[in-house]
Amino acid sequence: MIKHSAAWMMMGNGIYAISQAAILAILARLVNVEAVGMFSFALAITAPIMLLSNIGLRTQIITDTQNCYSLSQYQKLRRLCSAVGASLCVAIAAVMSSTTELIIVVILVAFSKSAENQSELFYGVLQKQYKHRIVAISLAIRGILGAASLAAGTYYSGSIITGVICYTITWWVVCIFYDKKWTSRNITSTGNSEHTRYADLMPLVYAGLPLGISALLINLSIGIPRIFIGQSDGMHAIGIYSIMAFIVQTGSLVINSTGQAILPKLAVQFSQKDTKAFLTLTIKASLVVLLLSAFGTLGSFFFADYFLDLAFGSEVSSNAYLLTLMFAISPVQYLTSLLGYAISSTKRNISLVTVQALASLSALIASFILIPLYGLQGVVAATLFANSVALSGYIITLITALKSEFPKTSQQLSEQTK
C-alpha cells in the first residue's frame, strides 16, 4: 500500500516539479532572467504568508483519526484563512514592491496560492483514504497546464503579467473542476457548516497555528537568503539563484511525496504505540532521501553545464558550479523535510515552531554575514547552516517525542538510532 502510494505521489510531484522548473525556463527564454527573479520574488513574499494561512489543515485532516470535524467545516475555515492571507499579500506587495509590474505579479501569485490552499484541503481528504492516485494526477495536471498556460500567455503577449494571469486561472480551474469533483465522489458526507460558528472551529486554529507558523518559518529560511542577494545584486542574481534552487527543490518535491505517502501510516503507528514499525518506516524513507541526493549530486557534477545551457541559456550555465554545490548540501535539506512529516505524525507541533524559529534566525544571521562577502556562494553556505540547525533540532525532537510517549522502549530507541 505504502509503496504504491509513494510511487503515485512521486510521479505526481515529479511532473509538478518539472513543470515548475519549466516555468523558469519559459520566462528566461521568452522574457529574460530578470523576469525569473520577479516571479521568484513574488513567491518569496506570498509563499510564507499563504503557508501560515494554511494552518496545516491538510495534516490536521489526515491525523484526525476520530473524524472530529466535517469537510464542510474545514472548508469554511479554509475560505476565511485564505482570504485573510491573500489580503495580507496584497498589502505587503504594495509596500515592498518597487514597480507596478512587480506589484501585479505578486498579487496574481497570491491568488494562485489561494487556489493551491483549496486543493491542499481536498488532498488531505483523499490522502486519508489512501486515494494518492487522484492527488498525483491532480498535481500532474496542475503542473502541466499551469506551465503551458503561462507559456502561451507570455508568448502571445510578451508580458509576464499575462502569463501569470493564465497560470492563476488554470490553477483555479483544476481546483474546482477536478480536485473538488473527485473529493465529492470519494466522501460519503461533507457535513453542514451553515450553522457552524467560527468560534466552534477555534480548536482547529489553535492546533494548526503551530503548523502554519512552522511552514512559514521553513519558507522564510529559504526566502531570507534570496532577499539578501536581491538587495546586494538585484533581480538578475535572484533569477540565477532561483533557477538553481528550483532544480534542487525538484528533489524536495519527491521527498515530500514520500512524506505525504507515509504520514497516514506513521500517524496510525504512533497512535498504536508501535515504535519499531514507526522507526523502521522512517529509517527506510531516510535511506531513499540519501540515495536521491547522491544521484542529484553526481548528475549535476557531470551534466549541469549542458543541461543549464540547453534549458536556460549560457547566461545561466556559466554559474553551473552553484548547482553542484547546492546538490552537495541537499542531504541535510532533504532529511529535514522528511523528518518534519515524522514529527507532524506525533502532533508535536510546538516543537516544529521552536526548531524552525531557530533555523530562520540562523538563516538571517548567516545571510547577513556571508552573502555580502561571498555573494552566491554565501547563499549556499547560509542555507547549509540554517538547514543543519533545523535537522539537529528535528532529530532531538523526534527522539524526545518517542521516548516520552513510549518510556519502556527508550533503551530500544537509543540503540536503533545509533
Image (cartoon, rainbow, N blue to C red):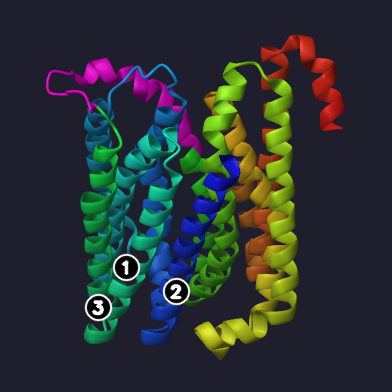
Disc 3 residue crowd, few under 14, some 14–19, many 20+, Cα 10 Å: many
Give x and y (percent) for residue 385: 70, 50
Instruction: Answer yes or no: is residue 266 visible.
Output: yes
Q: Secondary structure at mark 3?
A: helix
SS category of the residue bearing label 2: helix
Residue 329 % position (x, y) = 72, 58
Give the answer, above or below, for where 230 lies relative to 348: below
Determine the residue located farthest toward the top in the rendered image.
408
Who comes first in sequence, dot 3 or dot 1?
Answer: 1
In magenta stretch: residue 196: yes
Task: Please give left or right for residue 368 compared with residue 30 in the image.
Answer: right
Residue holding disc 2: 22
Q: Nearer the viewer, residue 181 or 139?
A: 181
Q: Between residues 353 and 375, which one lies in front from this camera angle?
A: 353
Q: From the viewer's perspective, is 241 left or right of 121?
A: right
- Front position in the image: 206 or 59: 59
Residue of label 1 = 145
Q: On residue 137, which mark appears?
A: none
Q: Kindly state the secondary structure of the residue where label 1 is placed.
A: helix
Viewer-proximal residue among 86 and 190: 190
Name the image quarter holding the C terminus: top right
**Residue 229 location, x and y as percent?**
55, 66
In-image side of 313 versus 30 (left or right): right
The residue lying at 31 percent from left, 20 percent from top is 69
Instruction: Please state which amino acid type lies under the numbered disc 3.
Output: Gly
Which of label 3 and label 1 is nearer to you?
A: 1
Residue 230: x and y in percent read 49, 67
Task: Give the image quarter of residue 129.
Answer: top left
Q: Which residues are magenta?
A: 189-214
**Pointer 2 or 3: first along the chain:** 2
Q: Determine whether 99 is above or below 312 in the image.
A: above
Name the residue: 67% across, 20% down: 274
